Amino acid sequence: MSHISPERLAALVDETAMPDEASHLAECAECTDELAAHRRLVRLALAETSREGPPLNDWAALGAMLKAEGIVSTMPMAPSRANRTQRVMRIAAGLVLVAGSALAGRWSVGLDFPATPQQAASAAAATPAPVFASPQAAMQVLTSSQQQYSDAAAYLAAQDTSSHFIGLNVNTYRARLTALDNIVASTRTALYQAPQDPVLNQYYLSAMAAREATLKQYEAALPAKQALERY
Amino acid sequence: MADQLTIRRAIHGDEAALRALWVQYAPRIDAVVRRLVGDPDQAADVAQEVWIQIFRALPTYRGDSQFGTWAHRIAVNRTLNALRSLRRIGSSETAIEEDTASVEHDGDRSLLAQTIDEAVQKLSPGARAVFVLHDVEGYTHEEIADELGITSGGSKSQLFKARAKLRTLLKHLVDVPISQEPSHVAHLS
């Protein structure tokens, strides 16, 4: 048998040799060396898998593109002169709004509420507290709940027919959006300092979910033919 | 765990979170773009498109796989599309044939590559894509066939031809006399 072709030797790195090829390799040092060289080549390639390099672009250029594409949010950052008390009040107001949105939504779709705080407490006590195997497991539940909360808030916002009963109007939604923007801006600023802080992340994400839900309500409350210009 | 929070914020357009994802994953993602595209300037343009595509698709990321794996798939897909639009791998089935014809004759040392990266750049775009996807990125021939719109047999054929050419280009790196093979030395001792 003549020598095995280079391409066939390259294939034999992955494939089993035919009987005549195996016999030839057992006798031919040249082809055996060639096959070994091909195996070294494949090992070299495999070693490239984990090799990293510097990014091909800088963030300034990419960030500008992302802004132009509308992928980066252009919401305002936190006002630098806002004092701590104001920020705390804004966050507190935001939480009330977040809870309020959910309650208004529940009311609008006809769900029952606990009549008294005692009833609420006993209802909570009847639900066994979950046991988590690890912080990771708890975080997964938190993240999943967050997603469910966002989805539910968006759904309720789309279903909400209660606004005219409880006096919500375009001005109310606009005020709520301003408050939520402040919460988002405050928590976002804080996240620059503590990006992995779970409390800040949850506040941030809750406010974002409430903001998106409110935007839908706001848009629905606008007079016909009036497009949403801001937010 | 940390990624999930960052990803959630990135979905909402938080620039710090988007940047954090880019800082963490660009070295790996851009490396595969660089290998597939070859030309550094074109690779930079394609990488920019790739990242925009990744961030645009973020809301569809459900966490079924690692974020890096998910982003890597988008990067490969987008890069191949970009190359296809440049008509660089449209005729990949034949491009390698032309390249391979010269393999037997380019043993000149001046044609040798100093690194595997440099050698890969000397392959035709189609052959480079198959080699990088299979031998570097670990794709199967079936996956490559899907990505490139060729048959798995065609993928194998191109891979073996690409390896044969690279074996010549990297002669000085892979031609180690068998007596110097570590495993062989160990076996003899």
Image (cartoon, helix red, strand yellow):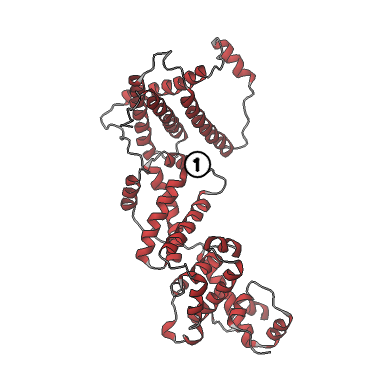
Question: Seen from this angle, which residue lies furthest left?
Answer: A81
Does residue A154 sit above or below A33 in this rendering? above
Query: What's the residue type where badge 1 is placed?
Result: Gln
Q: Chain of mark 1?
A: B
Q: Residue at x 46, y 46 (%)?
A: B57
Say whether residue B173 is visible. no
Q: Determine which quarter of the picture holds residue B118.
A: bottom left
Residue B182, image quadrant:
bottom right
The answer to which of A56 and A212 lies nearer the viewer is A212
Vertical placement of residue B181 versus A100, above or below: below
B189 with respect to B16 (left or right): right
Residue that carries the numbered disc 1 in the rendered image: B4
Q: Answer above or below: position of B152 versus A176.
A: below
Residue B148 shows up from this direction: yes
The residue located at (43%, 51%) in the rendering is: B53
Q: Nearer the viewer, residue A25 or A186?
A: A25
Q: Residue at x 49, y 57 (%)?
A: B77
Quarter of the image with the C terminus of chain B in it: bottom right
**Closest to the observer, A221 or A175:** A221
Residue A26 rendering spot, x and y as whole percentages: 70, 84
Query: Residue B72: x, y in percent?
Result: 49, 55
Q: Secondary structure at mark 1?
A: helix
Identify the residue at image location x=50%, y=43%.
B60
Q: Residues within 10 Å of mark 1 (few under 14, many from 20)?
A: some
Q: How many marks?
A: 1
- Residue A82: image quadrant is top left
Please provide percent x and percent y for residue A4. 63, 84
Instruction: Tell me where residue B18 appears, x and y as whole percent.
Output: 40, 45
